[in-house]
Amino acid sequence: QQPVQSPQAVILREGEDAVINCSSSKALYSVHWYRQKHGEAPVFLMILLKGGEQKGHDKISASFNEKKQQSSLYLTASQLSYSGTYFCGTVHSGTASKLTFGTGTRLQVTL
Amino acid sequence: GAVVSQHPSWVICKSGTSVKIECRSLDFQATTMFWYRQFPKQSLMLMATSNEGSKATYEQGVEKDKFLINHASLTLSTLTVTSAHPEDSSFYICSAGGSSYSNQPQHFGDGTRLSIL
């Protein structure tokens, strides 16, 4: 079953922060985060492998709560270039390498 | 630079035509590649897992006789949409990479936009 993301869509002004959540009904081995611009392939952002792990680069970071089967992506001081659709991709225990993509969150950053 | 190359990027053809899409890993050998389909404003849905030297594994609801997958070498997987119809029009994307239990990212091709008239 597909992981559910929230919110479905969000509009931000440049400089504002956002949180995108990803919730799975199955036990997770790892969570991947991708951003996709319209008409393009997804671009890898980061992987979270262990429960409770937090990773980040620049102003984008993420956390992984293995027990709750959830992950969150944090975007701080958003830039116009952050606009796009964000997908979490989950790898479940026992399904080596197979990514199941979440429902997606459309993010638009405006001036 | 790109580590996965997908070709062609855009195909427009008549109903009933078969269309072949290629996915190549450029810098590494990929025993496993994945094929996804994405309809407008929707998420990526995994169609099948392509396994080098053996049969592909299809997701539930994907017709294996319609979407033929061949993974004859460690760097090339092909997806053939046989007798394509307008409802097959979609964005098809392949990916490669990721070891067992995926602590490495998957790398995506640029996608193929298929339009069936």
Image: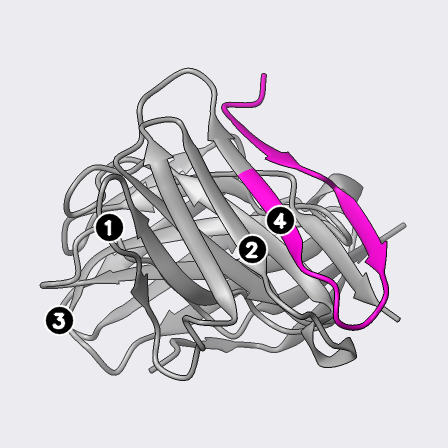
Q: Left or right: where does residue A89 sit relative to residue A35?
A: left
Quickly name the residue at label 4: B20
Residue at horizontal 70%, vertical 66%? B90
Q: Is residue A26 visible?
A: yes
Quarter location, residue B47: bottom left
The residues bearing labels 1 and 2 have C-alpha atoms spaced at a distance of 23 Å
Q: State the mark number for residue A97.
A: 1
Marks 2 & 4 on one chain: yes
| Picture disc at residue B34 | none
Q: What span is colored magenta in the figure?
A: B1-22
Of the residues shown, which amino acid type is indicated by label 2? Thr
Question: Whole-Å distance between the Cαs marked 2 and 4?
Answer: 4 Å
Which of the two labelled residues, at mark 1 and mark 3, occupies the earlier sequence position?
3
Is disc 2 on the same chain as disc 1? no
- Relative to A64, does residue B65 appear above or below in the rendering? below
Q: CA distance from mark 3 to mark 2?
A: 41 Å
Instruction: Residue under label 3, please give it.
Output: A67
Q: Nearer the viewer, mark 3 or mark 2?
A: 2
Give the CA distance from mark 1 to mark 3: 21 Å
* Image-quadrant location for residue B2: top right
